[in-house]
Amino acid sequence: MNRGRGGFRGRGRGRGGFRGRGRGGRRGNFRPRRSRDDQDGEETNITTADIDSNPQAYFTGNCKFDDHYDVQTSHGERYTASLAVMMKNGVDISQNAKVRLLAAAWARGDHDFAKSVLYNKKYFGFTEIHKAVLLLDAGRNARVAEKRLKRLQFQQSKVHPKKMGKVKSELDNLNKIKPSHGSASGAVCKQVKRWVQTLTKEELEFYALHFPLEPWKKLADICHFHPEKDFAVLPGFLSFCFGLDPPEFASWIKECRNLNKSNINDMITKHPVPFAHIKALTDSISDVNKGKLARDEPKLDTVLWYYENIHCKEADEAITDRLARNESLTLATGKLLERLLTIHLMRLGDSLSFEEKEKLWYSWDWDAKPDGPDTKPKQDLSIAPFFDDLMKFTEERMKNIKLSLDAPIVIMGDRSPSMEVAIKTSSVIAGILTAITSAKLVFFDDNNMDSPFLPKTIQEVLTLATLIDVGSGTTPAASLMPFYFKKEVVKTIIVVTDEEENGEVTVPNEDGTIPETNNLYFGCDSKEGYYNFAKLYQKYYNEVYPARLVFVSFVDQTDPGQIVSELKGMGFNPLQFKFHRYRPDLSKLDSLFALLSLESNTFEDELKATDAAIKEKGLEKVFQEIAQSDQ
C-alpha cells in the first residue's frame, strides 16, 4: 500500500475535504467530555499512579488531595524520596500536585516535610502556598456560606433569586473542593508566616510589580500577617496590597504599575523598569532606551528572554558586547532553543504561504525559466549578530544531556493542519530528541513521510523546523504501519502530536497491495480491517515488540488526550508530557529531558540512594541541598 510520500496512507480527511471519523465515531476535533467534578475544579484522576511501580505519576498527573494524603500516610518514605529525585533532576511538577501534596502534608501535621519542600522556591512559591491554604480553608468557608444561606432562607423580607443563587453556587463549589482532612490551622498559618519572613526585599518588590494583589489580601486575612514584623524588609508592602498609599513604600513601584505610552521613556531614564512591564509598550520605546535596557538589566538572561520586544541595532550591540565579556547565562536549554528558533524566524521574515506559492507556480513562465521560482526566504543576518555565539553556547549545553532510552528509537512528528500553530515548535522538539538519541525521525499527516534528513546539530534542527509544512489529516498509525508491516523492532516510540486523530490505516497484503474488500467511504464508523494508532499499537505490541510509548502532547493541561485516553482504556500506560496547545513553551524541554531520563532503570537506583540520604542526613537537609543546587 505504498502511496505518495513515504508509503503508508491512512483514510481520513484530505486537504480541504470531509473530516473522517476515528474509532467510536470521534471526530478529529473531539475533546473528551470533562466530568462534573473536573468542571468544578477537581480533575479526573487520569494518570495511573502507583507508589511501587509508578510513583512519578503522583507529581506529574492529576492525583486528588486524598491520593496524596493516603500515600503520604502509608508510604511516606518512598513518596518523599520520589519527590526529591524528581526535583533534583529538574522534572516539572504540576501545580495541582504541588498544591495538593503541600496541603496534604499540612493536613497530616507533617510540618517537617512541608518546611523541607518550601525551601525550594523554584518549585514552591506564593501561588502554591496561597492555593494550598485556600484548599484547607474551604471547609471553614463552606460552614460560613451555609450559615449565610440559612439566614437568607429564614429572612422575613423576600430575597432576590440572583443573590440566593450566588450563595448556593458558592456553597456547592466549596463543598466540592473542601478536603476530607485538615484545616488552615494556627500551626499552618505559623509556618506560612515564617515562609513570608524569608522573602527578600527584591522578591516582595517582584510580587508587588507582577502579581495580582487580591491573593495577598486573602492570605493575610486567613493567616493574620503583621504588617511590620512579617514584612520588615519592605515596610508598607501589606498596606500597599490593601490599596493604601504608604509613604515608606517605593514610589517607583507605584509608577511602574501605571506605565503608559506617554511616560515609558521618561521612566526608563530615571528608574530600572522591569522588562515584564514594557512588553505591551515596546512600540513607544526609543531605540536609544532599548539599548539602555539591554545594557542596564542585571541579568543577560532577561534581555535575551525579551529580545524580540527590544530588537534594534543599539540592543544588538549591547547584547553582543555582554556575550563577548562571557557574562553568565543561566537560561534553561529549552529556553535557549526557543530563543534561537525565534531569532531564526525573525531573520527569515515572512515566508510565502502555501496559497501564495501555488499562485506563483501556476503563473510562472516555465519555458523561459525552467528552474522555477525561488521561494526560499532570504535571511537578514543583520538581525541578532550574536546568533552564532549563542548557538555555540547552546550546543555545548546540549552535550550534557544524556537520555538512556532503550534503542532502537523512532520519533513520529505530527504535521497535520491542526498543528499549524505549533508545527515549528513540535518540529524542533522532534529534531532535538532525534539529535540527542540518534533516533529515526518520521512525520505524518494522512501519510507517513521520512524526515528530509536526520538533524545532528542545532542549526540542522532549526533548518528542519522551517522545512516541515502542514499536510492533511491526522493519522499517526500511518507512521507506525511500516514498522508493523516489516516486523521491525522498535523499543521506544515517541509521538509528538496534538492527538486529534481522524484517520486509520489498513494492513496491506504480503505483497504490499491494499485489500480491495475494505474500501470505506469518508465519514463512516471504524470497520474491521482498519486500525487507528491505539489498535495498531496493540497489534505491534503483541506481534512484534512491546515498545515503550512516550507522547509529547500539544493539548490543554486538563485534557487527557484522545489517543492516550484510548491507550489507557486498553490497559497500556504511555508516558505523557504536555505542551500548551496554542502557546507551546520550549523552555519546558528541560523538564521533558528530565522526565525521559527517569524512564531508565536508574530511577530506582536514585530512589534508593535518596532514601538512604534522607535517613542519614534528615529530610530537611536533603531538600535544602536540592534547593541550593537549583539556585
Image (cartoon, rainbow, N blue to C red):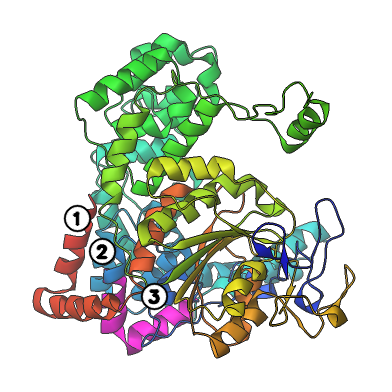
Determine the secondary structure under disc 1. Answer: helix
Nearest to the observer: residue 512 or residue 98: 512
Q: Position of residue 558 (x, y in %)?
A: 59, 65
One can see residue 222 in this view: no
Please state the total of marks drawn on the protein image.
3
Nearest to the observer: residue 304 or residue 81: 304
Q: Earlier in the sequence, mark 2 or mark 3?
A: 3
**What amino acid is at disc 3?**
Gln
Query: Which residue position holds label 2?
Result: 88
Q: Residues within 10 Å of mark 3 (few under 14, many from 20)?
A: many
| Residue at 64% over, 64% down | 499
69 part of magenta stretch: yes
In the displayed structure, does residue 256 sit left or right of residue 333?
A: right
In the displayed structure, does residue 49 sit left or right of residue 444?
A: left
Residue sticking out furthest to the right: 521
One can see residue 365 in this view: yes
Locate residue 476: give its quadrant.
Answer: bottom right
Nearest to the observer: residue 481 or residue 514: 514
Residue 56: mark: 3
Q: Position of residue 358 (x, y in %)?
A: 78, 35
Image: magenta residue range: 64-84
Dots 2 and 1: beta carbons under 8 Å?
yes
In the displayed structure, does residue 625 sit left or right of residue 474?
A: left
Q: Name the main secondary structure of what is drawn in magenta.
A: helix
Query: Which residue position holds label 1?
Result: 629
Nearest to the observer: residue 551 or residue 60: 551
